[in-house]
Image (spheres, rainbow, N blue to C red):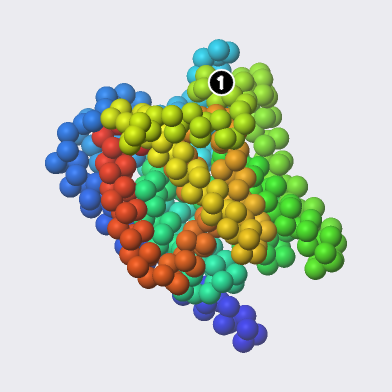
Amino acid sequence: MAGTDDERRTAIRTLVLAVATFAAFRGALFVFDYVGLHLIPKVGTCRPQWEPFGSGHEFWNGFFRWDGGWYRSIALNGYTYRPGASGSVAFYPLYPYLARWLGVVLGGPFVAGLVISNASAIAGAYFMLRLGRHAFDEAVAERSLVQLLVFPTSFFLSAFYTEGLFFGLAAASMFYFYRGRYVASGALGGLSMLARSSGLVLFVALAVDLGIDLYKKRVRPKWSMLGLLLIPLGLAGFMLLLQHEVGDPLAFMKVMSNWGRVRSWPWVPLIDAFRHLDPLLPDKFDDAQEVLDALTALAFLGIGIAMVRERYPVAMSALVLGGVFVPLSTYVLASMGRYVLALFPAFYFIGAKCKAHPRLERFLIFASAFFLALYGMRFMRCAFAG
């Protein structure tokens, strides 16, 4: 009973720390964004679907740019599909439908979506801290969370996007996996699969980890392990929904080519991106960003390989490596900075290195905060930022 009480107190302390850390770093970003909106003119053209709160609400509208317009459309009208054209079927359903359903009691889908994003990100911070303490130590866990929260694309955790929701579900799924609660892990992973395609990478990572443990007889087989199969069932649920709403369960795959995403060897987009280096970053934003996305992919591939060499938990390193290789295999590098944000185990590696090298920690916080402010302001000012 004492152990149960101790665990409960630890959980409460961890939750308080997660909320406080998220509030401190996110609050600072919100203040910067609010002030920046009054100092920096619009960089891009704001489309009507990106301004759900109407004119005069620049700050709140700033969380609904780009893909947020697609999620808004799904939340309001469900899915639409026209072969040969871009469409909402490329986006997974859990986030916009939750926003619609919770909007009934939270004042509309737009407010509900922002609540979901930030509450889920706090949940992700909580499980990231607990998992980090279990797998490493408290210092690494806390440093890892800070590095994730100042990462240049971390503002997406609070936007009308799926990043916050996926982070919370994936971190919880992996936490329960390492506690041997496979049904809970699978259920949460299944929900993450309904949130974004990265859920399939999570399933493979957990399955490989479990398979190795079974092969090496570290764990004994039990029926509850089949709970991990709930994760790919999330994809099946999405396909059934598409069959019901647009009449084609594979529409989400067919529409990808309209965004330029086609099958490719992972190294091809990297080679093409570095052709723009002549000799430094090009002046055109799209070309310069493509190079930065390529560098980001290489950095996280390097982290994943280093995690394997340093014998990090298999599911963690597999999630990082798979989470980079999959988008690289679609040729398009755009949004790579946002995709790697979901690979939260990589930040354990970064946190461990920061613990050993305090100067590296200070440099990363400074550099990340600079780009976070830059990209966050670009996004809110209707320019592409991932």
- Residue found 17% across the figure and 38% down from its top: 40
- Residue found 57% across the figure and 82% down from its top: 6
Residue 371: give x, y in percent of width and height: 31, 47
Residue 283: give x, y in percent of width and height: 28, 30
Q: In the image, is residue 101 above or below residue 22?
A: above
Viewer-proximal residue among 295 and 173: 295
The image quadrant of residue 57 is top left
Viewer-proximal residue among 143 and 11: 143
Q: Is residue 219 visible?
A: yes
Q: Quadrant of the C terminus?
A: top left
Q: Quadrant of the N terminus?
A: bottom right
Q: Is residue 190 visible?
A: no
Mark 1 sits on what residue? 257
Viewer-proximal residue among 244 and 278: 278
Other-residue count near label 1 (Cα within 10 Å), few / some / many at <14 / 14–19 / ≥20: some
Q: In the image, is residue 50 above or below residue 233?
A: above
Q: Amino acid at mark 1?
A: Ser
**Helix, strand or loop status at disc 1:** helix
Residue 49: give x, y in percent of width and height: 35, 26
